């Protein structure tokens, strides 16, 4: 794994001192003042409201530059205190996985991905000081989980967000699944620091997974054959235009981004995963694509990471 962001970004660059929509009705009924998820779901002041009144501090862990906009443009543009952390630099080792727009070395491609992220997030009012890259190599995050958990735990400890937003574990991309694993381990780490530590709610945005041999986007893979309560946001005309404009800044990824629509976004509370087991029967999407990492190898590395943290932490 390269050094964090290969000096393109810094491992930690944030200043923490200033830190017609529809909604699914199956959200938490607890008081929004005590429950950030309930606040997001509130029909009058939540994320689906024309005039949301939300103060939650959000830390968004995205596997790659563009994942944050695909899954959570409404969070990025409608909440005032969002920090975005990219798990990888968006540049795979093998050039055959690069964009046709890529020129030069892998570092050059990573730099292009970073510059596109800065440009896209500027449209959401998020400055470079609130964007962090942990610097893992695209497709290889699972091989560096211990170091990534350590770096991300430090961010989590310093930021103290109310919400940690990341990918679900569903076998679409090995880095998406690694982000889910790292988020769960980092929260476990935070819980072990002190009984008085405030623990963020772990919330998921949609990514993609295999369904009947094709790539399914914009919806969650049912967890253990169950549909968990979701917050469903139908983007307004203005919201769709803003999201499309942000995605357009990722011009090197346009051949992939055409597979995602801008009509709606979905969020849910993260379930407790068993990362030793596959997220669903059959081939995972990245196995269908013939990528180097297999699901079995991913789970072997994930199991070892979980075992290591169980020994090192308080469980």
Image: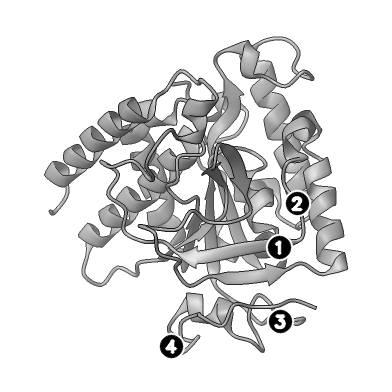
| Mark 1 lies on residue | 264
First of labels 3, 2 by sequence position = 3
Cα distance in 3D space between marks 3 and 4 = 18 Å
Check whether the beta carbons of the residues at disc 3 and disc 2 lie within 8 A of each other.
Answer: no
Residues under labels 1 and 2: Cα distance? Answer: 8 Å
Characterize the local packing of mark 4: few (<14), some (14-19) or many (20 or more) Cα atoms within 10 angstroms.
Answer: few
Note whether 166 is above or below 148 in the view shown: below
**Residue at the spot of label 3:** 49
The residue identified by callout 4 is 30
Q: Residues within 10 Å of mark 3 (few under 14, many from 20)?
A: some
* Coordinates of residue 277 in the picture (x, y in percent): 28, 42
Judge whether residue 143 can be spotted in this image: yes
The tag earlier along the polypeptide, 4 or 1, is: 4
- Foreground: 119 or 30? 30
Task: Give the number of the disc on residue 261.
Answer: 2
Q: Earlier in the sequence, mark 4 or mark 2?
A: 4
């Amino acid at each position: 794994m390269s050094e964090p962001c290969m000096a393109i970004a810094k491992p930690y660059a944030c200043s923490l001192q200033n830190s017609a929509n529809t909604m699914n009705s199956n959200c938490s009924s607890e008081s929004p003042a005590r429950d950030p998820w309930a606040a997001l779901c509130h029909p009058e002041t939540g994320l689906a409201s024309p005039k949301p009144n939300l103060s939650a501090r959000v830390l968004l862990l995205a596997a790659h530059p563009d994942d944050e906009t695909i899954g959570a443009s409404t969070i990025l543009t409608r909440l005032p205190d969002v920090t975005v952390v990219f798990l990888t630099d968006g540049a795979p080792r093998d050039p055959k996985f690069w964009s046709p727009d890529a020129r030069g070395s892998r570092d050059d491609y990573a730099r292009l991905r970073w510059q596109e992220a800065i440009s896209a997030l500027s449209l959401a009012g998020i400055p470079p000081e609130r964007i962090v890259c942990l610097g893992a190599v695209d497709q290889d995050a699972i091989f560096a989980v211990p170091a990534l958990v350590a770096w991300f735990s430090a961010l989590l400890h310093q930021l103290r967000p109310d919400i940690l937003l990341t990918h679900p574990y569903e076998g679409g991309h090995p880095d998406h699944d690694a982000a889910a694993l790292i988020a769960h381990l980092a929260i476990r780490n935070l819980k072990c620091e002190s009984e008085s530590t405030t623990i963020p709610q772990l919330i998921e945005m949609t990514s993609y997974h295999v369904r009947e041999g094709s790539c399914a986007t914009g919806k969650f893979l049912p967890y253990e054959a169950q549909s968990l309560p979701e917050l469903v946001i139908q983007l307004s005309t203005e919201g769709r235009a803003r999201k499309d404009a942000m995605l357009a800044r990722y011009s090197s990824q346009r051949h992939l981004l055409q597979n995602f629509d801008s009509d709606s976004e979905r969020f849910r509370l993260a379930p407790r995963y068993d990362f030793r087991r596959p997220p669903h029967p059959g081939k995972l999407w990245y196995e269908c694509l013939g990528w180097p990492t297999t699901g079995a190898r991913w789970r072997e590395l994930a199991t070892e990471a979980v075992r290591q943290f169980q020994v090192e932490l308080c469980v």
